[in-house]
Each structure stands twice: as structure tokens, then as C-alpha cells.
Image: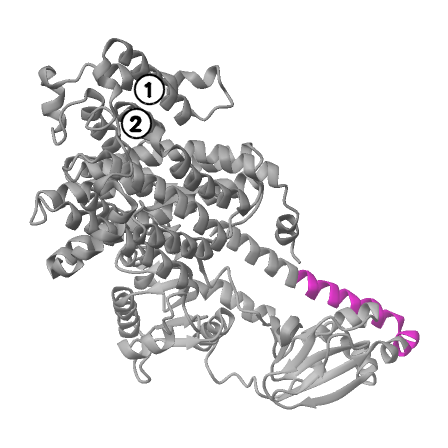
Amino acid sequence: MNANARKEAVIDWSTEALGGFAAMLVAMPQAIAFGVVVYSSLGSGDAAAGALAGIVGTAVLGVIAPVFGGTPRLISAPCAPAAAVLAALGASLASGPAHGDPARLALLLTLTALIAGALQLFYGLIGGGRLIKYIPYPVVNGYLSGVAVLIFLGQVPRLLGVPAGTKLWAAALSPGLWNWHAIPVGLAAIAAMSFGGRRFKKLPAPILGLAGGLGAYLLMTLAHPELRVAAGNPLVIGPLFEKASSFGAAFARWSSFPRLSLMDLHSVLVPALTLSVLLSMDTLKTCVVLDALTRSRHKSDRELMAQGFGNAASAVLGGLPGAGTLGASLVNMQSGGSTRVSGTLEGLFALVAILAIGGLIAWVPIAALAGILIVVGWRMFDRKSFRLLRKPSTIFDFLVMASVVAAAVVSDLMTAAGIGLAFSILLFMREQIRGSVLRRKSYGSRVFSKQRRPPALMEVLEREGERTVVCELQGSLFFGTTDQLLTELEGDLKTCRFVVLDLRRVQSIDFTGAHMLQQVEAQLKDGGGRLLLSSLPPSLPTGQDLKAYFDEVGLVAPQRGALVFDALDDALTWAEDRVLEEVRGAADGEERPLDVAGVDLFRELGPELRAALEGCLVERSAGLGERIFRAGEGGDEVFVVRRGLVRIELPLGGGRSHHLVSFGRGDFFGEMAFMDRGVRSADAVATAPTELFVLSRARFNEAVHREPILGIRLFARLAHALALRLRVTDAELRALQES
């Protein structure tokens, strides 16, 4: 049983109930307000139907989402994004063919919520929880701030108490339409919610706002007796369980389904998609905050499926959709809720509230709800984003947010979603172009292959290595970064014979990138050079097979094309061999096995000492792929390569190995065991037919007893050779750090 399971196995029901009850007190007033906002947009003015939809959404989401979700303490309830999207859709539908048909309008909103829930369920099934997190923060922040502005502006007419359907500017500029009974109630709710928390710190702000509005309304009834009637009173929600506001209306609206046209269904698809993404982002954002506060980790996909199931069930039962809400979740946590039980209890408390205090809810003033939502919108708007104007590097991010907000306010949320998607693409391209696709650039005179060569050949490579340029690429090579790479290579293409591109860290390549590589290959080929590609990933994150793709576009055609190598070292070795051939000539007699006098390690011993050494040497041959020694074996021999090539490999886990170095004709290996007589630290494998001189320490010590100067001379030569190797390594490390 894991830690989370053990935690939930022991439940303190009293603290869970307290957390759930406190969360319900936060979620319920806002849900009622959101429901009134949505149903008021239909033009029916039926505030009671909206209030009931908000309460049902709170109850259904509260019960179902925690049961199927996996995030402790998370409270799911109707939220501002859902209200904004559905209110905008309702206003649009009310002015269309469904005008004057409340049941049909309500059904279209229900279908929107149902499709959004189904989409969330689909996102969770395909692992979309991780993808939604990658939507750029400026886009998400701009969208949520746009929702906040819409909520804020949409409540001004209700705060002023103007007749239903009156537009914002008409309401603001027509004092004759204002209801002077509503304004004090709304202002009292705003004041209580904004400042009441300083005195009553343990009470949720929405409860304080609601209490302030109710108190102002009750005081007003003392002077105006006509306000003491709930039925037909435009200032209050009104009875919940009468006429269209009854529970049966939620199911009766489905009778309008046969009258829906394909155009009706088409009109709700984009809003449903927008709603599903918004609710998913809102939930996951809340989960991330809870993770940070509780040092836990939520399961995105499981939570999305739970939210989708809850929203679909809420839609079927006539409730509003919603998401994991931060305010109610924090109150739940602060009040003692620590498991998913508190979330379920919050939903049950909401259900009890419908049955127990439904009559009291009828007296909730609409202006008080408007005041609560005005404060919610004010707090939801990210005013800190204006700080982005202080620095030139973040001005574009501010413009993205401002554009999305402006689109939401001037046009609608669907347009804002489209603009947000376009900006997401632009932001991605900007980040790709900002970050260089070229991770490191160096030349063959400073970076060498792992094949050790005699000092004379190393001098040639140091002198002529500028003919080879080595570029390690990273990220995405696409139409936005190809010109950047081409600019970096422009000068080298005029002076270099070989261009080596290491693709190990490349994430994707599009046709423009492949075409650019073809241009580079063609230019090199015309000048007698070659393009060398190394470390092609077998499969990119996109699933693309890079080798097959290069074959399709003709970049690695057999007759005329780039050469492909498994590793960067193989490409460097090939380029170094070509440089040496061009400088020294191909016919160099290097295939003839060296004798003792021709070995650089023994060159300064003199005839007498070499003769003494020859008595210690043993000749050995190794075929292609033959292992000369294995890591962990004992041994005291040093090996000198007379002819061939030996690869030194460091064994890794899982049957893998790392290529350390390759030794060719005239070089030596195994000197560590020769000097300290310890076990071998790596494998030695012949990668070509190889002939060796083998010098064991035991036989060498016997010769040194007879000729002591032999030991001094040989160890001096060993120290000199190892010093040269270290100098080459130092130069390579310096080149890597400086490039």
C-alpha cells in the first residue's frame, strides 16, 4: 500500500466534514451567481433556473469528481470560465433562430456542457493532461483575464438593476433605468466581500459578500414593504421549484432534441471545445498549486477523466459545468480537509442545501450576486501582467495577453481562443528562433576523433584540421531556424572540405530543414567535399524515422549524397583519414607491420637496449572483432600495435559500452595494468586484423635486472607519451568549453 493509500485509509471524518462544509460555503454563492449569469443571457430573466443550475452543478461535480479523480483536497464546482463561455454562447443563440424558445436554448447550453465533458474524458484517455500544460502562460493568462473582464462588465447592468437584456453602455449611460433599490445592495456585497475579511478572517469572502447584500436588502424592506414578496420580484432570485425552475425542467428540455438542426449542433461545437480546454486548464492549474502546497503530485489524465465525467453528469441533470476551483480548494485545505472525502462531502452538503434551505435561497438579491462576481472578476484579472511592460524582453508577452483580452471583450471568447491559438504558434516559433539550433561549433584542428595517432600525424591534423568544421545541432531544424544555421555555415562552406553535423540532440526536422541540408551537400560536393551526418536518432519524439526521411528526400542517395555515421567519432575519423591522405598521400606503406626499431615508444632506447627488450617481447595476432582483454581481468602486459586498429570500450549496464579511444599502428595501450599491475578497467577489441607486440611486466623486470637503464628509459618514454595524450585531451576540453 503506497503512502497516499495509507493516508486515505485513516480518515478523520470530523475534519473532512468541516473542510467540505467550509468549501461548500465558498463554492455555493459563486455557483448561484454563475448560474444567474448564464440563464440571464438567454433573455428569459429566469434567475431561479440559473441559481438551481449552479447548485445542481456544485452538488453533482462535488460528488462525482472526487470519487473518480485522484487529487486530495480538490473541490470541483461551477467556475468563471464556464459562466463566461456559456453566457456568451447563450446571448449569441438568443439572437438567432432559437430566439423565444427557452427550452431549446437551455438544451443547446446543456449539449455544449455535455460535449465539453466528453472531450475532457477523451483528453484524459489519450494522455492530453500533459499537452494542455504546454499552452503558453501568456495565452492562458490573457484568456482568464479576458474572462474576468467579461464577468466584471457583465455584472454592471445587474448591479444597477436595469431591465434584463439592457446592454452595458445603455445601462451605464441611462440613470433613468437604474433601480435605486438594487445599487445599495450590490455595493454592500462588494464592501463586505472586499473588506469584511479583515475582521472576520475565518469566514469565506463570498459568504461575507452574500451576508452584506442580504443585510442591506432586509434593511431596505423595512422602508419598502413591496420588497417583502419573493414571487415576481426582479430584485431577488425567486422561488426555486416553480414552473421552469423545477427539477423536472432539466429533463423536460430534452424533449426539444428532435427539433434541433445540424446548424444548431454545429454552433455549439467550437464553444464546447473552447470550454473543455478552459475547464481542463483551470483544473490542472489548481492541481499544480495544491501540489506545491502539499508536496504531492496529481495525476493529470485521471483528473481530466473525472472532471469530464462529472461535467457530463452535471449537464444531463441540468447543472452547470465546472472545474477544480482554487478558492474553495484552499478553504477546504485550511479547514482540515486532507483527502478526496472532503470533496465528496462538499457535494453532499450542496445537495442538502437545495433541500433544506431552497426557500431561503429564493431571497438572495441578484444585485448581491452581481457584487460578488464583480469582486471575483477584479481578483481574477492579473494586474501584475502590467509589470511586463517594464522590460523590452517581455513586452511581446504583454501584447499577447492584451490581444487575447481585447478579443474576448470586443468580439467573443471563441475569437479570443482563435487568437490565443495563433499566438501559441507564434510564441513557440519565437522561442525556437531565439534559442540557437547550433549547440556547439568547432574545427578539426582542435577537436579530434578518439583514434590515437602518432605525433607526426597529429601535427598534420592540427595544421590542416581547419578543413573540417564540426557542428552539434539541437532542437528543431525547421523553416524558422534553417536560415540561422545556413548563416552560421556560410563562411565555412567557402573554406572547409568537410562539414560534420551531429544530430544526436535534434528533436524534429521538416522539409525546409532537409532541403537546406541538400543545398549544403550540393555546395560541398561541387567543391570536392562531403557532408557528414552522425548520430541520427532512430526515432524522434514526433515518431519520425530520420534515416528513412532523408532517404525519401534524396539527401543520403547512394551515388550523390551525404554520408551517415553511427557516431560523431566515426565521422571525425573518416574526415581525418581523408585529410591525412590528401596531405601525405594514400600510399604510405602503413599496412606493413612495424618492427621494434619502428615503434615510437622504443625509438630512443638505442641498439643494445632494444636488443635486450626484444627478448621480452611476444608477438600476437588478433582477428577482426577479437577481444584482446576484458574489463576486470588481471594482467600486467602493455600492448604495442604493429598493424591494425584496437578499440578500447568501457562496459556500461544493460550490455552497452562507451567508446573511449582507438589505437592504431605504432601506438600502445594497457599501460595502466603494466604500471600498477591492477585489473583491466576496460575492454580491448580489434576492429581490424591486428598484429601486436606484447610486453609483460614480469619479463620486463627480469631484463631490467640485467640492464637497469632500460627501465629508466622505457618509463621515461611512457611518461612522455602519456603527457602528450593529456595535452591533447586538455586542448579538446578547452575547445569544447570555448565553442
Question: 10 Å neighbourhood of mark 2: few (<14), some, or many (≥20)?
Answer: many
What segment is highlighted magenta in the picture?
702-724
Q: Is residue 397 visible?
A: no
Residue located at (64% from left, 91% from top): 623
Residue 279 is situated, as x and y percent measured from the top left of the image, at: 34, 47
Asked which secondary structure carries label 1, the reply is: helix
Q: Which mark is residue 369?
A: 2
Q: Residue furthest right?
A: 705
Q: Which circle marks residue 213 in the picture? A: 1
Q: Secondary structure at mark 2?
A: helix
The residue nearer to you, when weighing 542 against 172, is 172
Return the x and y of residue 295 as percentages of the image width and height.
Answer: 58, 43
Q: Amino acid at mark 1?
A: Gly
Determine whether, in the image, residue 207 is placed left or right of residue 81.
Answer: right
> What is the x, y in percent for residue 384?
36, 28
Magenta region, main secondary structure? helix
- Which three-letter amino acid code belongs to the residue tagged 2? Leu
Query: Going by the picture, which residue comes out furthest to the top?
Result: 223
- Cβ atoms under marks 2 and 1 closer than 8 Å: yes
Q: Quadrant of residue 714?
A: bottom right
